[in-house]
Image (cartoon, rainbow, N blue to C red):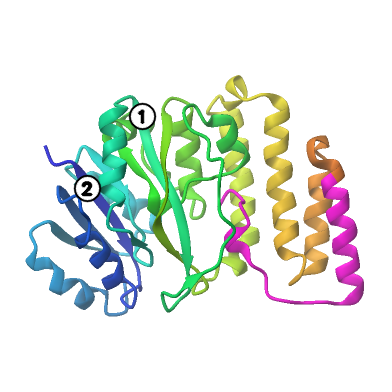
Amino acid sequence: MLRVSIVMAAKNYARFLPEAVESVFAQTFADWELLVIDDGSSDDTPQACRPYLADRRVRYFRSDTLGQPKAKNLGIALSRGAFIAFLDADDAWEPTKLEKQVRVFDTKPAVGVVFCKRSLMDEQGRALPAKPASGFPTGSVLPQMFTQNFVCFSSAVVKREVFAHVGRFDPLWDLAIDYDLWLRVAKFHTFDFVDEELVCYRTGHGNLSKKLRDRVDTAISIMHRAESRYGVAEQVPREVIADGYASTCQTLGYVMRASEPFASLRWYLRAIQWPARRFVSLKGLAAGALVAARGQRTKASPENAGVNL
């Protein structure tokens, strides 16, 4: 059986796609197929894909604006591998990524998801400084996942049986679709990771900051549903659930403090209702009030926020 199917849902990323695909071709692990799901692109995505179709491992499918959840689900449905990896068309992999992650599955067959660290690059592909990440949880990670989505999507490799068990991406959500999936997965399956930066995550070219409030609202709705319908409350202590809600609101308050100080205050006030982080939220509220009083406005940096996006 084919070992790894790589699902790449792409829409209007022709300028980035060749770098992403080349990073797949550069993998030291060769037993893979790449499924490019072109979700109704209006740019040159078909032309950008065409040179790679000479390799029979690359399969291109054109869809009619399904949206991210359905496009990714189509890729999963068409895939044939024992493991399914995800790579966004604007990101790229280091050459040893799949080799090292498949090795984890081979040595720990009970694991359902293997992820890794990420580095950051700008729109032009230049490396960006970032605070080193550490302390990623492994094993049964549901409490930690409820508090923060710590899995970079382009780093994830998932055992096929996991989707048969918990389902695929939920089309109900337009944003934070991976967070909803990981909460369902984490209830039943264990996570592991490779302690290396094997994904280059591109930032600065999208509209994350513009959609940040919508993303956090969606994340909170996902948390509510996980608590009420997925049975998360049966496995996650109440204080951890409260901390998850508070930290999500608090982080958005921090991210928006410089660019939208008055909106930031509203999110800190929302965070205060949960006692777990009340002191920190009050400190943030005071700092946000000072920024608002000074009338300072600078560019926000949501990429390193750590919210459940």
Q: Is residue 82 above or below residue 217?
A: above
Q: Position of residue 290 (x, y in %)?
A: 90, 67
Q: Is residue 153 above or below residue 208?
A: above
Left or right relative to 72: residue 279: right
- Where is mark 1, residue-wise? 111
Left or right relative to 19: residue 131: right
What's the residue type where badge 2 is placed? Ser
- Where is mark 2, residue-wise? 5
What's the residue type where badge 1 is placed? Val
Q: Residue at image x 39%, y 50%?
A: 155
| Mark nearer the N terminus (2 vs 1) | 2
Find out whether residue 295 is within the magenta segment.
yes
Q: Residue at image x 90%, y 75%?
A: 294
Find out whether residue 172 is within the magenta segment.
no
Q: Is residue 81 above or below residue 110?
A: below
155 or 179: nearer the viewer: 155
Q: Quadrant of the N terminus?
A: top left
Mark 1 neighbour class, 10 Å CA radius: few under 14, some 14 to 19, many 20 or more: many
Q: Residue at image x 73%, y 65%?
A: 256
Left or right relative to 81: residue 90: right
What's the magenta region?
Answer: 280-309
Q: Position of residue 169 (x, y in %)?
A: 40, 44
